[in-house]
Image (cartoon, rainbow, N blue to C red):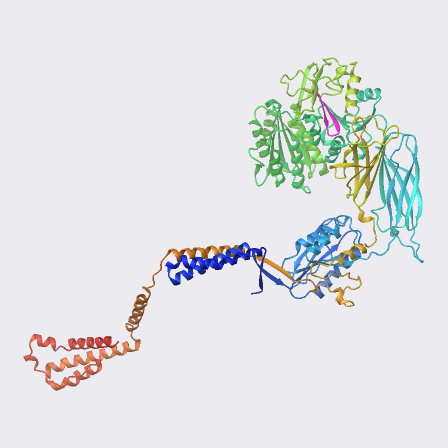
Amino acid sequence: MFGYDIDFDAPWYLLLLALAPAIWWFSFRSLAGLGTIRRLLAIALRTLVLALLVLALAEVQLVRTSDRLTVIYLLDQTLSVPAEQRQAMIEYVNESIAQQRDGQDRAGVIVFGRDPAIEAPPYDDDIQVSKQIESPIDPEYTNLAAAMRLAEASFPEDAAKRIVIVSDGNQNMGDALEQARGLIDAGIGIDVRPVTISARADVSVEKVAVPTNIRKGEPFDLRIVLYNSAVASDGNPGTVTGRLVVYERTSDAPQAISEQELTVAPGRHVYTIRRQIDQPDFYTYEAQFIPNQAGDDALRQNNRATTFAHVRGSGQVLLIEDSEHRGEHQLLVDRLRAANLEVRVDASDQLFASLAELQPYDTVILANVPREDFSEAQINMLVRNTQQMGCGLVMLGGPNSFGAGGWANTEIEKAMPVDFEIKAAKANLRGALAMIMHASEIANGNHWQKVIAEEALKALGSQDYCGVLHWIGTDKWLWEPGMRQVRSDREKMLAQISKMQPSDMPQFGPSMEMARAAMARLGDVAVKHMIIISDGDPAAPAQSILNGLVAGKVTVSTVAVGAHGPAESALLQRIATATGGKYYQAFNANALPRIFQREARRVARPLIFEHAAGFAPIVNLSNEIVSGLPERLPPITGFVMTTAKEHPLVEIEIVSPRPTDGKNNTILATWTYGLGRSVAFTTDAGARWAKGWAGWEDYERFFSQMIRWSMRPSGDTGNFTVATEVKDGQGRVVVTALDKDDQFLNFLSLGGSVIGPDMEAHEVTVKQVAPGRYVGTFDASAAGSYFLMLNPGAGRAPLRSGLNVPYSAEFQTLETNEALLESLAALAPRGGRPGIVIAEDARDGAKTPEKANLFRHDLPNARSSQDAWHFMLLLGSCLFFLDVLVRRVTFSFTWVRPALAKVRDRVLRREAAAPAPEYMERLATRKAEISQQLEERRATARFEPEAESTAPTTGAVAEELGAKPPSAAKPTPPAQSLGPQQKEEDDYTSRLLKAKKRVWDERNKDS
């Protein structure tokens, strides 16, 4: 009916309709008092209510069957498909839609790489895909399964469904065959058009392998596997000539250890290089193939591969010092080396670039280095190196360390046993920072102003104040009140900064005065600082404003960006000089965040506690770090105040007697963080506050014990070998465990973690699969370096290893996976026939139309259903109300007949009272004529009173009015002989009115 069928989700409930006869049986007797009509109506309503409720319980649905078809194309846009063939597949899609789509059929397009994207949603029109794909995708991975899932979710319900896969079939993520089985269960057909990749010469470096048990001084073989994918023929041998270069890298620059000319024939080839390691370290080997002719090699992305080798030695320490104060920690370095520790010193302007560069070291020391010298990535590497790789992390005190160095609210603070800000800070420990933003005229000016404001805010403590002034037609604070204490509002303030849109400020004076006045109202804060970033073209502030800033002890630093000339730069420099601030001239916007981080550290100066007379630290807890030391240590003159974390693993070994509150006087605190250990030593190593320690006899003992405690644990290493490999996007680690007697070590609780290229740590579960053999797997689908840390149990040193995925699996296979594509097309959808494999040359379907028609209707018609049970329930509720109304309320219809009669009478009377307009017009005309005759008669009656003259007129008038004329005419008596009464009766007007009345009365009676 109307193109819909009825279906039920729970048809067994329809058996309840058998109760209808029972309802009639019982209701017919119980409702006998209602009368025949009411009783039958009530029973009928009850039966309908029952039927509607049963239909609702059976979940009735309206089902519509449609013969429409929706075809969605899945286009492989990965780099394994040559660019010319990616263009050819777009042309194929456009032609097939234009030539084969018919009627109301729909067509859509999905492109895919690592993730799919809808290029054109299903639409009933001849859509045409642009030659330039607009959807952003990652072309270095093929995830056909994800594209199939997106297509399934994109199909409309009212049409049959088919997907057309246009791909080389080389998936390296997901399982397309498993996903296809779910599609056919849903009745979705699958056609494929393979993209045939012609055989091309391509040399890839498949693997670089080193032995797993390299020992110091022993030679070993470094093996490189090359693969040439070309197919030799009679006219083309498929060989590729080029150079194979092998590099060895430690923490220093890479060195080329081998370079040789090669002619690589089709197939796999293994090349061996003999090496010997004389120094313990963490080594990285990289092999690179460079073809002599660029056209001989199809892909450059797969021309290099790397591997790792780790040779243990004695403990090594990396000390990082401030590049602006080189040699500041030379005393500490000399004493540690005297204690047989290998120490390497790096300046903060020559930092590590990868996690691999940190692996040779068992402890990293941050020796009074500011936070702005490190990128976020380098900070994450330091923390992951401690938490997941077991390396020690030590921070030494100084004006550039802890909270005073801008390290608050960083990952380093989380790794330390102390918090870098004072929890219960007094007023004299707070600072205030105001930022005036005027850099909108530089390239991406508003973006950089947001970045620098965010970095400065992050460097402040929760007790500090911060305010941002910008110009939006007037000088205005970004938030209210203008100078707000950070506290727990940091995230809200960062969100407001991200929405900031400052404009070109006309003058400095008003904003500087607003900032000065706001800081004056803060009361007792130790440091008041202002930063102005500008191109220098606003009008200069009045001298009185500068004097007010100096009087209020507000320092102003200025940053010149995009200044239009020396005059404008000089203005900014004068403002900084007059107020005791610092002037910067930034030629590169990338340097701005570091400048603002450094300036924000001025506000953190109150965190430094100094006392010129000195004070002696006290040993608070005895352990291996302070073993053999006296209870009172030599005096120091200062340290950076912190707050010890409230955690059971935190140990506070040394405290200061000052300040006396006992909450912020930690000198030495330690704890275990993940697999590593971290140390916070809040005073320095003898350069500034601990100068008296240079001659202390226990100086070497104390610092060597502290550094050794923090180092990676060393112990019985047994005879463990660790091998790693990657296959199908999965990393695999194999551990062979033997004891010192070369007996298998069984039932070990091996566990650990892996750090991937994204610097995120993931747990690795290792299971025993054979005597002394343990295997674990982890995801290694992304290209980059993976670092493994395995813990073989108590008393044994952790095992470190790694592997490198030099390039995506997308560049490893250059052949069409026809087997997968044919398997997908062979699947038959529920109720339909299997798909087809479309030959690449059958683009327009002219040769094999029965096979190439993608819009053929060989799939079951789509059935779309709509729930209707709620309509049944609503209608049943209304009928139930009528059922109650019929049974409870008595209706009488005796009033109907009188009412109808009254209506009829009113209608008839209205019609009679409304004579035709023509009749009324004639009556009025006749009345006027009779009136004229009457006037003439009166005049005649006075002067000629003969009776004969009146008779004809009277008869004529009576006949005109419809009355009968008098039977005999009587002469009218003379006028003078009539009395008053007789005159009234004979008055013609009165007689005329009476005649009219008689006429109307007769008409009413006749009707």
Q: Residue at x 66, y 58 (%)?
A: 122
Name the foreground residue: 897 vs 936.
897
Q: Quadrant of residue 824?
A: bottom right
Quarter of the image where the C terminus is located:
bottom left
Q: Quadrant of residue 223?
A: top right
Note whether 999 is above or below 303 in the view shown: below
Residue 498 seen anywhere in this rendered image of the structure: yes
Note whether 523 is above or below 766 in the view shown: above
Name the foreground residue: 53 vs 115.
53
Residue 135 seen anywhere in this rendered image of the structure: no
Name the foreground residue: 908 vs 913.
908
Main structural element of the magenta stretch: helix, strand or loop?
A: strand
The part of the chain drawn in magenta is 667-681
Q: Residue at x 7, y 78 (%)?
A: 978
Q: Position of residue 483 (x, y in %)?
A: 58, 31
Q: Quadrant of residue 602?
A: top right
Q: Position of residue 665 (x, y in %)?
A: 66, 19
